[in-house]
Image: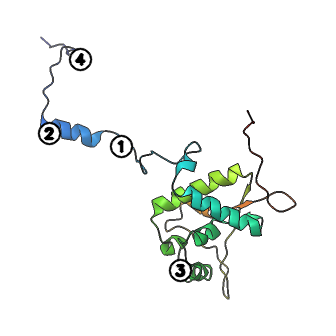
């Protein structure tokens, strides 16, 4: 005679320290960045990098109409101008090799820059980076493994579409 399977309520479970550790190890994990899960449109202004990025973008727009992420990295002091020139001349295999921060922080910076540029009504435009100097003008790499999303994020410039100099958009808040 076959035994019928027990229902969940009928089963008796024996808990042991080994099982608890195994259960904890296999539980789904979420990455937390400074107490948050990810940087989103709702919380990017609370990020500690946001004030620096906002100031740098304002400085760049005071002098021109285009905000390249590479220029933001230079002005935030994460990339030395000499290292940027070495990369542009083809002496460095990929840009991330000479940036002075970890890749998680760098991705967060690019994400915050994109959100802030959207709030300023800047238009994204992908730019091709070619090698400077003599010799073949091959396309430059930003990442070690040529991740297409990150390559596009680095090459995406933000352009002011207006004819005159940049002016910040009007506040969306209504006076009460």
Q: Mark 3: give few (<14), some (14-19) or many (20+) Cα within 10 Å.
A: some
Mark found first going from the N terminus, 3 or 1: 1
Secondary structure of residue under mark 3: loop
Q: Mark 4: give few (<14), some (14-19) or many (20+) Cα within 10 Å.
A: few
Left or right, residue 147 beside residue 155: left
Q: Residue, x 67% and y 72% (percent of image)?
A: 129
Task: Kindly indicate the quadrant of the structure image that contains residue 154.
Answer: bottom right
Spatial CA distance of label 1 from label 2 is 19 Å
How far across and down, in percent of the image, does residue 132 sit?
Answer: 67, 82
Secondary structure of residue under mark 2: helix
Mark found first going from the N terminus, 1 or 2: 2
Q: Is residue 86 above or below residue 158?
A: below
Mark found first going from the N terminus, 1 or 4: 4
Q: Mark 2: give few (<14), some (14-19) or many (20+) Cα within 10 Å.
A: few
Q: Which residue is mark 2?
A: 18
Q: Nearer the viewer, residue 160 or 47?
A: 47
Q: Which residue is mark 1?
A: 29
């Amino acid at each position: 005679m076959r035994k019928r399977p027990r229902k969940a309520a009928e089963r008796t479970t024996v808990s042991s320290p080994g099982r608890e550790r195994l259960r904890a190890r296999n539980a789904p994990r979420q990455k937390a960045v400074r107490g948050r899960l990810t940087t989103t449109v709702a919380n990017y202004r609370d990020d500690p990098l946001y004030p620096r990025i906002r100031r740098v973008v304002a400085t760049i727009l005071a002098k021109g109409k285009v905000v390249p992420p590479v220029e933001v990295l230079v002005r935030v002091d994460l990339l030395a101008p000499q290292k940027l020139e070495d990369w542009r001349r083809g002496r460095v295999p990929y840009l991330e090799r000479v940036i002075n921060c970890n890749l998680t922080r760098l991705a967060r910076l690019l994400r915050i820059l994109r959100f802030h540029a959207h709030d300023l009504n800047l238009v994204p435009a992908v730019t091709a980076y070619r090698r400077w100097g003599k010799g073949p003008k091959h396309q430059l790499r930003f990442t070690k493994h040529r991740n297409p999303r990150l390559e596009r994020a680095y090459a995406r410039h933000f352009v002011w579409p207006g004819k005159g100099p940049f002016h910040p958009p009007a506040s969306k808040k209504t006076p009460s």
